[in-house]
Image: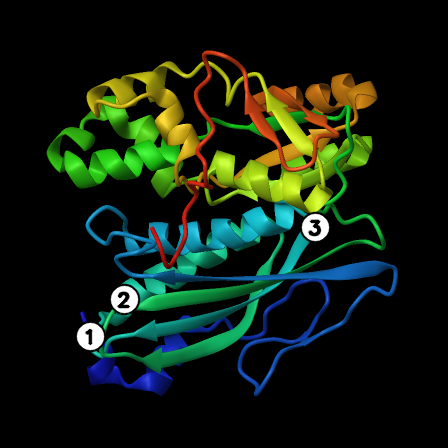
């Protein structure tokens, strides 16, 4: 397979780029100096960006290039889901070594495009550059939402319920299992756990359905770790939280924790990029929210309530002890 140093920048771009992208709002796509998109005057623009660095955000020995691309896409989609936004357009910047195989890079790009496309977004441009060290991928994703209807972290009110989708902690447990027990982690019994880390699910459609109920008062995606993101939401809303539990009963996570000599809540409290939704709910609309979530087959667990005791995060007896400082992922301290 040819490497980038053999084919050069412009042939690589030709292979990577999709010309003449046909997607709503795209006037000029890839191939020009910049993309041109047409905005709906009745909607607000929502923008996010994420950079993934080789060895820190993905382990090449555990993910195919297509899975790396898909996971980068999911990280950005998760941010838009947390704002109840509809994904529209993406820009992709690749910084890779000259000895990178072009076919693998194309596979990565197609994996990214496939996941974005399944969620309504199209790649409309980007950049390709060379590095001497670790490769990185940066995606900027633009979306939109009905004017004035974006979710934020700051709307939670005393009396609201706190709920989370999926199974927080699984991604962190899978990463630790892969790093500490590589051979064991490849066994079939851990496939579902590894999927939570390697192949997380998009919550964009679920966010849209929840938004239609009008029951969500605040939201954040669980990308740093459940405790850290609970603290972020509470701080932004100026409220306190009383947690009865940190997730649904999860036999798979329990088995993983036992195999690693840890407790389930160690993974739920620690760094874990699960890409789930953490939301505050109007208790009067709990039933309608649970109905739409059940219709999509997504685990959804009410784990606590919002209080007026600003800044206080309390856990019920038996759940665990709140860390004195956030234990979520920190790029410069983790």
Examine the rendering and report whether any part of residue 153 can be seen. Answer: no
User: On the picture, is 3 further left or further right than 268?
Assistant: left
Scheme of colours in the image: rainbow
Tell me which residue sits at (60%, 83%) in the image: 34
Question: Of callouts 3 and 2, which one flags the residue occurring earlier in the amino acid sequence?
Answer: 3
Residue 217: percent from left, percent from top: 77, 36
Tell me which residue sits at (75%, 20%) in the image: 286
Q: Residue 103: which numbered mark, if any?
A: 2
- Dot 3 falls on a residue whose secondary structure is loop
Callouts 2 and 1 close, C-beta under 8 Å: yes
Displayed quadrant of residue 65? bottom left
Q: Which residue is mark 1?
A: 2
- Dot 1 falls on a residue whose secondary structure is loop
- Dot 2 falls on a residue whose secondary structure is helix
Q: Which class describes the residues within 10 Å of circle 3: few (<14), some (14-19), or many (20+)?
A: many
Tell me which residue sits at (31%, 32%) in the image: 173
Question: Of callouts 3 and 1, which one flags the residue occurring earlier in the amino acid sequence?
Answer: 1
Q: For the residues marked 3 and 2, what is the alpha-carbon distance in whole angstroms?
A: 33 Å
Q: Residue 85: which numbered mark, if any?
A: 3
């Amino acid at each position: 397979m040819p490497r980038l140093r053999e084919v050069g920048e412009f042939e690589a771009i030709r292979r990577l780029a999709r010309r003449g992208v046909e997607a709503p709002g795209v006037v000029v796509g890839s191939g020009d100096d910049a993309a041109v998109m047409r905005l709906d005057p009745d909607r607000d623009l929502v923008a996010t960006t994420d950079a993934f660095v080789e060895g820190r955000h993905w382990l090449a020995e555990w993910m195919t290039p297509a899975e790396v691309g898909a996971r980068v896409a999911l990280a950005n989609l998760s941010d838009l889901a947390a704002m109840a936004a509809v994904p529209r357009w993406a820009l992709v910047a690749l910084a890779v070594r000259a000895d990178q195989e072009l076919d693998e890079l194309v596979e990565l790009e197609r994996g990214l495009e496939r996941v974005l496309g399944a969620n309504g977004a199209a790649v409309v441009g980007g950049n390709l550059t060379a590095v001497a060290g670790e490769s990185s991928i940066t995606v900027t994703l633009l979306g939109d939402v009905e004017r004035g209807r974006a979710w934020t972290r700051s709307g939670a009110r005393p009396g609201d319920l706190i709920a989370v989708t999926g199974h927080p902690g699984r991604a962190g447990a899978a990463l630790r299992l892969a790093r500490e027990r590589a051979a064991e982690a490849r066994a079939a019994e851990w496939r579902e756990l590894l999927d939570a880390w390697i192949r997380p699910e998009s919550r964009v459609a679920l966010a849209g359905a929840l938004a239609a109920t009008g029951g969500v008062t605040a939201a954040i995606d669980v990308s740093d770790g459940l405790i850290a993101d609970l603290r972020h939401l509470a701080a932004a809303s100026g409220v306190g939280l009383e947690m009865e539990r940190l997730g649904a009963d999860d036999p798979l996570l329990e088995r993983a924790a036992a195999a690693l000599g840890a407790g389930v809540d160690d993974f739920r409290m620690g760094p874990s990029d699960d890409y789930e939704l953490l939301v505050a709910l109007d208790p009067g609309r709990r039933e309608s929210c649970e109905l739409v979530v059940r219709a999509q087959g997504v685990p959804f667990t009410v784990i606590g309530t919002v209080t007026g005791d600003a800044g206080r995060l309390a856990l019920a007896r038996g759940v665990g002890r709140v860390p004195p400082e956030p234990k979520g992922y920190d790029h410069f301290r983790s």
